Image: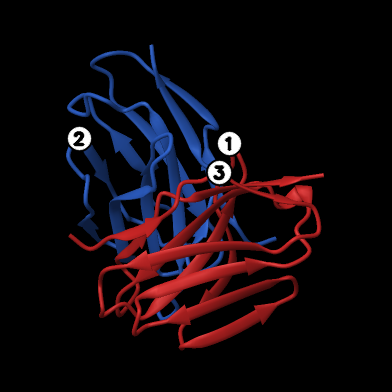
Amino acid sequence: DGGITQSPKYLFRKEGQNVTLSCEQNLNHDAMYWYRQDPGQGLRLIYYSQIVNDFQKGDIAEGYSVSREKKESFPLTVTSAQKNPTAFYLCASSNRYQETQYFGPGTRLLVL
Amino acid sequence: QKEVEQNSGPLSVPEGAIASLNCTYSDRGSQSFFWYRQYSGKSPELIMFIYSNGDKEDGRFTAQLNKASQYVSLLIRDSQPSDSATYLCAVANTGGFKTIFGAGTRLFVKA
């Protein structure tokens, strides 16, 4: 079955700690995205990647970093510089020439 | 600031009624329009997309687009309690790499 997987489902971060959220897709999509969702708010774009070894900042990239070394994988690191990381993190992908984005199940990040 | 606006709701309709969800957007250059459904605690799932002015139907769902008025809507016919969720409107510019999501409208279908 084709799809997008995210792990872990829940993640706890201690103050000053960097944590990495995993996103893998087997849809052969070129483009991948990371969004943050806070209660009662829309999705806000953190980073996106149109192709392997290339990525661009979204609207709220400060305190986050990404890599795109493989087409299937787009991990997101939440660094200690992100002072308010508690949120629901969603990874999505789309075919380069189509605009429809498909979402993974999400990772909920909580701060201890 | 390019925006996508939705009424936060909740919109409450009885089972079997038509639910009408509305969305306005500010960027006249927008090319693609999407409706996603999001159940509480879950990720968004695509319901429909529409690119051209007019109506697009898929089962109980109809998307309506009016680019002149910068307005897109979603109609759900024969609403079911399982339709109770938050509906997100999303608008993309050319190329689709910058998709802006509205905050969503909560729909509650009463049995």
Residue at the image point whose x is 57% and y is 84% from the top? B55
Q: Residue A73 location in percent, x, y?
A: 43, 53
Do we see residue A1 in this rendering?
A: yes
**Chain to which mark 3 belongs:** B
Q: Which residue is mark 2?
A: A63
Q: Residue A88 location in percent, x, y?
A: 44, 36
Residue at the image point whose x is 75% and y is 60% from the top? B17
**Chain painted in red in the figure:** B
Q: Which residue is mark 3?
A: B10
Q: Is residue A103 left or right of residue B107?
A: left
Q: CA distance from mark 3 to mark 2?
A: 33 Å
Callout 3 and callout 2 share a chain: no
Q: Which residue is mark 1?
A: B41
Asked which secondary structure carries label 3, the reply is: loop
Q: Which mark is residue B62?
A: none
Label 3 crowd bin: few (<14), some (14–19), many (20+), radius 10 Å: some
- Which of these two is toward me, A72 or B102? B102
Task: Please name the color used to draw chain A.
Answer: blue
